[in-house]
Image (cartoon, helix red, strand yellow):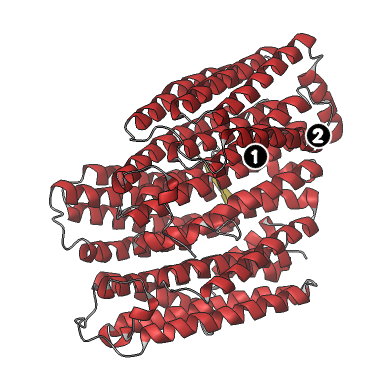
C-alpha cells in the first residue's frame, strides 16, 4: 500500500500539472508531491529495516534494503531539485510571458515531464519484476527526452537525439540480457513465472551459470550505457550540458544511479550461481575505462557542465570498482558513494546553474569571481567542488576511502592504488578549474547579487547533507547499507 | 530437486516437436532475415518502412505458430498485439513523419547499398557462428531461429551506424527490437505477458517521441540528416 501511494504521488502531481491554470499551481503541486514522496520514503525505509522487505500491489512492487537506498536517493534529490527548479525557472523564463499561451505551455511541459520523470525513476527500484525494471528504465529515457531538449536549440536537439539513440541501443542490449536471465530461470521455474525478484532470488544458486555469464555481460554493457560507464557514456556529456541545470542534476544525480541499481540487482541475482570473480573482472574493466576516460577529458574541458558530466562518469566508475572489490567495505562504499554522488553532483549542477543564469556562458574561461558577485553561491560552489573532488570532511571522502581500503582487504591492492592515482588527478583538475571560476576578478558588467533565494535554499540543504554525512553517519543509515550489502551477497566476505 | 524438475519440465514443454512446426518456423525465419535485408537494400524510406511492416507481420506469425505448437494462450495475445501495434500504429506514425520531411530517402549513406548488403551477409554468418554458444542444445526451437535473431540485432546495429537519415536510424532501432523479440520467442517462448505488454507500449511511446523529435530537428535544421548533428564534441 505504502509503495503504491509512493508511486501514485508523482503520477498524480503530473496529471494535476497538466490541468493547472497558472504557475503557482505548477510549483506548489510539484514541491508538495516531492515533499510527500520524501516523507513516505522515510516511513517505507523504516519498515524495510524492520521486516527485511515490503511488497505491494499484488506483489508487483517489492522493496528491500537495496531498493530503499535507491528510493532514498531519488526522493532526496528530486525534492531539492523541485525546490531549485522553481527559482531557476522563474529567473530563466523571465523574458517570456508565462501567464498564458506559449510561455505557459512551455512551463507546464517542464513540470508535467518533471513529475513523470520522477515517477519513472521511482518504478525502477521498487518493481518486483526484472522485466518491469527494464520497462521503467526505458521509460526514464522517454520521460526525460523532452526535458533534455527543453531549450529547443540545435545543440539541445542534437543532444536529445544522441541521448535517445544511444540510450535505446544500450537498453536493447539490456533487454537481451534480461531475456537470457529469464531463459536461464525458465529451465527451473517453467514459463509461467513472472520474472519476479522475490521468486528468482531463492533459486538464484541454481541458474545456469553459462547463460547467466552472457546475460550479465549484456546487462552491464546495456544498463552501463545509461549509467554512464565508459566507453558507452557518449550521450552523457551532451545531454548533461544541454539540459536545463535542474534536469542535469536529476539526470546525473539520480538517473545514473537508477541504471546502476539495475546492474546491482542483476549482480545480486548472478552472484550465487556465478561467484564473484567473473563479475568483479567485468566491473573492474568498465570501472577503470570510466576513470581513465574521465581523467583524459576533464583536463581538456572548456565547458563546466561537461566537466561535471565527466566527473559523473568518474563516480560511476568508482561505484563499479567498489562493487568489484566487494566485501562489506567495498559494497558499503559503493552504496554510500551512490548517495553521496547524487547529493554532491546535484549541488554542483545547482550552483553552476546559478552561474549560467548570471554569466550567460558555459565557458569556464569566461567565468571568474563568482564569490564576489554571488557570495553564497560562490561559497557553495567551492564547498561542492571540494566535496566532489573527494576531500574531507565531506561524505564522498568517506565512501571513496572505504572503497580504497576494500581494494586492499580483498586482494586488489594494485587496482586500488591505480584508482587512487586517477582520483588524485581528477582532484587536481577539478580544483584547478574551480579556482579560476570561484576566485579571480569579477566582471564589472554583471550586477552582483544572488539569482534566486529559493534555489540557494536547495543548495544549502544539499551542502548541509554532504557535510553532516561526512562527519557522522547515523546508525539507521549504516544499518540500511549493511542490509543492502547482505542483499548483494557480500556481507560475509 | 531442481535438476530433476527441470528435466521433467523440459520434456513437458518440448514434447516431440513435429517436423511440420520446425519447417514452418524455418521458412518464417528465412522470411524474417529476407525482410531485414530488404530494409538495408533500399534507399527510399518508404521502402524501408514497408519492409519493416512485413518483417513485423512475419514476427507476429512466428509468435502465433509457436503459440499453436506450445499451446500457450499468452503468445496468441502477443502475436495479435504485435501485428496491431507494429504493422499498424508504428508503421502509420513512421509514414506520417516521413511524409512531412523534405528528404524522403537516404541521400548518401556512409556505405553504399551493395557494400552494405555484403556487410549484412557477413554479420549473418557471424550470427550463425556464435549462436550455438548461447543456447544449450536440446531446446525445441534450437539454433537457427536464435541465429536469425542475433543476425537481426547485428544488422539493426549496422543500419543505425551506417545510415544518416534520422528516420532510417529509428528503423534500425526497431529492427534490433524485432530481433530481440524473436530471440525471446526462440529461446524462452516469449517473455511473461505483462512484460511483453510493457515492452510493446514502450516501443510505441518511443516511436511517437522520436517522431516528434525528428519533426523538431527538421524544423530547426531544415534537414533530418544526422550529419548536421555534429556540433557537440568532447
Foreground mark, 1 or 2? 2
Residue at 79%, 14% (x, y): give it. B17
* Residue B116 position within the rendered picture, expressed as x and y whole percent measured from the top left: 61, 36
When the figure is inspected, residue A255 is found, relative to residue B222, above or below; the finding is below
Chain where mark 1 sits = A
Q: Let me know if residue A173 appears in the view.
A: yes
* Residue A334 position within the rendered picture, expressed as x and y whole percent measured from the top left: 62, 66
Q: Nearer the viewer, residue A168 or B1?
A: A168
Q: Give the crowd class for mark 1: few <14, some 14-19, many >=20 residues within 10 Å.
A: many
Which image quadrant is residue A491 in?
A: bottom right
Image side of residue A60 versus residue A360, left or right: right
Chain where mark 2 sits = B
Residue labelled with disc 2 = B132
Q: Nearer the viewer, residue A331 or B157?
A: B157
Q: Rounded to the nearest whole Å, what is the CA distance between mark 1 and mark 2?
A: 16 Å
Q: Let me know if residue A128 appears in the view.
A: no
SS for callout 1: helix
Residue A176 shows which numbered tag? 1
Co-location on one chain, circles 1 and 2: no
Q: Give the crowd class for mark 2: few <14, some 14-19, many >=20 residues within 10 Å.
A: some
Residue at 59%, 69% (x, y): give it. A478
SS for callout 2: helix
Residue at 36%, 57% (x, y): give it. A155
Amino acid at each position: 500500500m505504502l509503495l503504491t501511494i509512493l508511486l501514485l504521488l508523482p503520477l498524480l502531481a503530473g496529471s494535476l500539472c497538466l490541468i493547472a491554470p497558472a504557475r503557482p499551481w505548477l510549483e506548489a503541486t510539484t514541491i508538495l508531491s516531492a515533499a510527500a514522496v520524501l516523507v513516505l520514503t522515510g516511513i517505507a525505509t523504516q519498515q524495510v529495516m524492520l521486516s527485511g522487505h515490503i511488497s505491494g500491489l499484488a506483489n508487483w512492487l517489492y522493496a528491500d534494503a537495496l531498493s530503499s537506498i535507491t528510493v532514498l536517493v531519488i526522493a532526496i534529490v528530486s525534492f531539492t531539485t523541485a525546490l531549485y527548479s522553481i527559482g531557476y525557472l522563474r529567473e530563466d523564463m523571465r523574458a517570456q510571458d508565462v501567464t498564458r499561451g506559449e510561455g505557459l505551455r512551455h512551463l507546464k511541459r517542464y513540470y508535467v515531464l518533471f513529475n513523470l520523470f520522477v515517477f519513472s525513476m521511482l518504478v525502477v527500484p521498487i518493481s518486483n519484476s526484472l522485466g518491469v525494471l527494464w520497462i521503467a528504465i526505458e521509460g526514464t529515457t522517454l520521460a526525460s527526452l523532452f526535458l533534455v531538449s527543453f531549450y529547443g536549440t540545435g545543440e539541445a536537439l542534437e543532444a536529445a537525439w544522441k541521448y535517445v539513440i544511444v540510450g535505446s541501443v544500450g537498453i536493447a542490449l539490456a533487454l537481451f540480457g534480461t531475456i537470457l536471465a529469464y531463459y536461464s530461470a525458465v529451465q527451473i521455474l517453467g514459463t509461467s513465472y513472472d520474472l519476479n525478484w522475490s521468486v528468482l532470488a531463492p533459486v538464484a544458486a541454481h541458474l545456469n551459470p553459462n547463460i547467466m555469464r552472457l546475460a550479465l555481460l549484456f546487462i552491464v554493457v546495456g544498463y552501463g550505457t545509461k549509467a554512464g560507464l565508459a566507453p558507452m557514456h557518449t550521450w552523457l556529456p551532451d545531454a548533461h550540458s544541454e539540459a536545463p541545470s535542474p534536469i542535469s542534476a536529476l539526470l546525473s544525480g539520480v538517473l545514473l544511479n537508477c541504471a546502476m541499481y539495475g546492474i546491482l540487482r542483476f549482480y545480486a541475482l548472478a552472484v550465487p550461481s556465478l561467484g564473484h570473480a567473473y563479475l568483479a573482472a567485468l566491473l573492474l574493466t568498465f570501472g577503470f575505462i570510466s576513470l581513465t576516460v574521465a581523467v583524459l577529458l576533464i583536463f581538456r574541458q572548456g565547458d563546466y557542465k561537461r566537466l561535471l558530466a565527466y566527473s559523473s562518469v568518474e563516480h560511476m566508475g568508482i561505484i563499479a570498482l567498489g562493487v568489484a572489490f566487494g566485501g562489506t567495505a567495498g559494497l558499503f562504499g559503493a552504496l554510500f558513494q551512490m548517495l553521496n554522488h547524487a547529493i554532491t553532483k546535484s549541488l554542483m549542477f545547482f550552483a553552476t546553474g546559478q552561474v549560467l543564469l548570471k554569466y550567460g556562458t558555459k565557458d569556464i574561461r569566461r567565468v571568474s569571481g563568482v564569490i564576489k558577485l554571488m557570495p553564497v553561491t560562490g561559497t557553495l560552489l567551492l564547498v561542492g567542488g571540494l566535496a566532489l573532488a573527494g576531500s574531507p570532511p565531506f561524505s564522498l571522502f568517506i565512501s571513496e576511502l572505504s572503497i580504497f581500503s576494500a581494494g586492499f582487504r580483498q586482494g586488489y591492492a594494485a587496482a586500488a592504488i591505480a584508482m587512487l592515482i586517477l582520483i588524485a588527478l581528477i582532484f587536481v583538475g577539478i580544483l584547478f578549474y574551480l579556482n579560476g571560476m570561484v576566485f579571480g576578478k569579477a566582471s564589472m558588467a554583471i550586477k552582483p547579487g544572488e539569482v534566486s533565494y529559493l534555489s540557494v535554499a536547495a543548495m544549502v540543504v544539499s551542502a548541509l547533507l554532504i557535510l553532516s554525512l561526512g562527519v557522522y553517519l547515523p546508525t539507521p543509515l549504516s544499518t540500511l547499507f549493511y542490509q543492502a550489502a547482505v542483499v548483494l551477497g557480500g556481507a560475509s566476505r | 530437486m531442481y535438476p530433476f524438475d527441470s528435466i521433467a519440465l523440459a520434456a513437458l514443454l518440448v514434447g516431440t516437436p513435429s517436423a511440420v512446426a520446425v519447417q514452418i518456423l524455418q521458412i518464417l525465419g528465412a522470411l524474417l532475415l529476407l525482410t531485414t535485408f530488404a530494409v538495408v537494400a533500399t534507399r527510399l524510406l518508404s521502402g524501408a518502412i514497408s519492409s519493416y511492416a512485413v518483417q513485423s507481420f512475419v514476427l507476429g506469425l512466428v509468435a502465433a505458430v509457436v503459440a499453436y505448437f506450445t499451446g500457450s494462450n499468452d503468445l496468441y495475445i502477443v502475436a495479435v498485439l504485435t501485428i496491431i501495434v507494429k504493422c499498424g500504429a508504428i508503421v502509420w506514425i513512421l509514414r506520417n513523419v516521413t511524409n512531412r520531411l523534405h528528404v524522403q530517402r537516404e541521400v548518401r549513406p556512409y556505405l553504399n547499398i551493395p557494400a552494405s548488403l555484403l556487410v549484412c551477409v557477413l554479420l549473418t554468418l557471424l550470427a550463425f557462428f556464435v549462436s550455438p554458444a548461447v543456447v544449450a542444445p536440446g531446446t525445441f526451437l534450437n539454433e537457427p531461429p536464435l541465429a536469425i535473431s542475433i543476425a537481426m540485432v547485428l544488422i539493426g546495429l549496422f543500419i543505425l551506424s551506417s545510415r544518416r537519415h534520422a528516420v532510417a536510424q529509428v528503423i534500425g532501432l526497431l529492427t534490433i527490437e524485432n530481433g530481440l523479440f524473436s530471440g525471446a520467442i526462440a529461446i524462452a517462448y516469449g517473455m511473461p505477458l505483462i512484460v511483453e505488454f510493457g515492452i510493446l507500449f514502450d516501443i510505441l511511446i518511443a516511436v511517437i517521441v522520436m517522431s516528434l523529435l525528428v519533426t523538431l530537428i527538421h524544423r530547426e535544421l531544415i534537414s533530418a540528416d544526422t550529419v548536421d548533428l555534429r556540433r557537440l564534441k568532447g
